[in-house]
Image: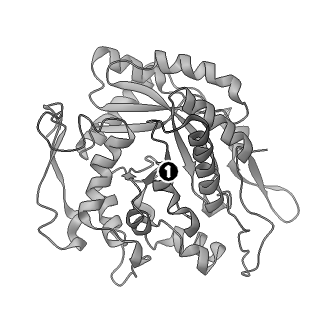
């Protein structure tokens, strides 16, 4: 119901399992031990600190697709002080269930908030991804011949149910973190935020929509109107084989021009935050900033065209998205995300001033030291 088994023309499975269908095999994968989970978290933290990351939002705390829930590792590290980063945990919404799970989420929020960990967010995966045809689109994907297919992707949560769930979560003070990649998923998520605003009035829950690969122009202005943050993964906004071979031909020219509209969102007054979706792709903020500014991948061959040049943003705005914008999303903007008197000394020392060189060299910048609360965690 929430995935697809890919098949050859004669109906036999190819071995490729999309989205929820991956659980058919995933449930057979052996579980990892608590010790391995703790070691994995600390290894990840060392890597992220080395890239100048002092805080993050983990988009998946809970059970999903037979992945191991990292909550116990976070709690162990929060209790013994080895969690040096500031972390917001996004509790996974089980799309096979409804509002009856909210009581459990409230209990998990209380139990999962200690030390530098705050489990104050709920993650709702509203659609899939464009490359395999599971991102939810307002009109069908094109087929290999450029004609409309019978596939418009998957909305994992029915839109009317989504409004109900988001409204109730908002009433309990939960932030909702949407995976919304296709234009239909983006609209459904914004409609749910609008329903919550209408029912609950203005709240400080700061919902955010992540990925935003295809956004219909009619929905650009709604982010500011509704107080929904645009959570960007800039590294993907460039010409490369995944984009040029698996995405653009199946979106068509008009929809392909709506991809990753960073510039349009910024001009509309939307609040921008930026992240990586690691480990899907590199967590390095400087690589993402490079693409946000240039719309060309750092390792692109010479002569690679700029991807939708009108959607480039300036270095200042890209840095703000990764610092003040992400601090805002994580409700940390009263204490970090900006270098200001009285704020926490969450600081990153770079090997150069990225404003001093040409934009094409931003990705060559390296982190020399990282501090969290005045304590050096990388150097």
344 lies above or below 250: above
Check the picture and name the quadrant holding the C terminus.
top left
Q: Please state the horizontal and vertical placement of residue 42, each as a whole percent of the image.
A: 33, 29
99 lies above or below 3: above
Question: Residue at position x 60%, y 73% from top?
Answer: 255
Q: Please state the horizontal and vertical placement of residue 235, each as a whole percent of the image.
A: 40, 61
Q: Please state the horizontal and vertical placement of residue 35, each as a whole percent of the image.
A: 42, 20
172 lies above or below 345: above
Question: Residue at position x 35%, y 37% from top?
Answer: 44
Number of on-image labels: 1
Looking at the rendered structure, the secondary structure element under dot 1 is strand
Question: Residue at position x 78%, y 71% from top?
Answer: 149
Left or right, 225 with reference to 328? right
Can the viewer see residue 219 in this picture? yes
Which residue lies most toward the right here? 10
Q: Residues within 10 Å of mark 1 (few under 14, many from 20)?
A: many
Q: Which residue is mark 1?
A: 210
Check the picture and name the quadrant holding the N terminus.
top right
Colouring convention used in this rendered image of the protein: one colour
Pick the front one: 214 or 49: 214
Q: Please state the horizontal and vertical placement of residue 159, each as a whole percent of the image.
A: 71, 47
Can the viewer see residue 216 in this picture? no
Question: Residue at position x 37%, y 52% from top?
Answer: 274
Pick the front one: 8 or 94: 94
């Amino acid at each position: 119901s929430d995935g697809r088994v890919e098949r050859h023309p004669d109906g036999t499975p190819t071995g490729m399992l999309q989205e929820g269908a991956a659980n058919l095999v995933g449930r057979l994968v052996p579980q990892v031990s608590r010790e391995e989970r703790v070691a994995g978290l600390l290894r990840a933290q060392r890597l992220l600190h080395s890239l100048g990351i002092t805080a993050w939002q983990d988009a998946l705390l809970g059970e999903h697709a037979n992945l191991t829930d990292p909550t116990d590792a976070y709690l162990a590290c929060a209790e013994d002080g080895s969690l040096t980063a500031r972390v917001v945990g996004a509790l996974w919404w089980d799309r096979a269930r409804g509002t009856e799970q909210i009581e459990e989420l409230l209990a998990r929020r209380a139990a999962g908030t200690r030390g530098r960990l705050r489990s104050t967010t709920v993650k709702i995966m509203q659609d899939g991804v464009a490359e395999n045809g599971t991102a939810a689109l307002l009109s069908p994907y094109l087929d290999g011949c450029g004609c409309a297919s019978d596939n418009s992707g998957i909305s994992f949560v029915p839109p009317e149910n989504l409004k109900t769930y988001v409204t109730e979560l908002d009433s309990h003070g939960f932030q909702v973190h949407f995976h919304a990649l296709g234009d239909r998923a983006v609209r459904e998520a914004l409609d749910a935020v609008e329903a919550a605003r209408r029912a609950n009035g203005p709240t400080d829950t700061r919902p955010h929509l992540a990925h935003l690969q295809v956004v219909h122009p009619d929905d650009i202005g709604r982010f500011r109107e509704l107080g929904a943050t645009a959570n960007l993964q800039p590294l993907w906004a460039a010409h490369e084989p995944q984009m040029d071979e698996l995405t653009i031909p199946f979106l068509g020219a008009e929809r392909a021009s709506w991809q990753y509209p960073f510039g349009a969102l910024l001009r509309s007054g939307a609040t921008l935050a930026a992240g990586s979706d690691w480990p899907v792709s590199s967590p390095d903020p400087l690589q993402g900033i490079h693409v946000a500014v240039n719309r060309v991948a750092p390792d692109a061959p010479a002569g690679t065209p700029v991807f939708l040049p009108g959607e480039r943003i300036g270095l200042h705005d890209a840095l703000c998205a990764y610092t003040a914008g992400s601090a805002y999303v994580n409700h940390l903007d009263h204490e970090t995300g900006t270098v200001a008197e009285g704020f926490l000394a969450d600081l990153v020392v770079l090997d150069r001033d990225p404003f001093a060189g040409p934009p094409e060299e931003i990705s060559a910048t390296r982190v020399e030291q990282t501090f969290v609360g005045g304590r050096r965690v990388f150097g």
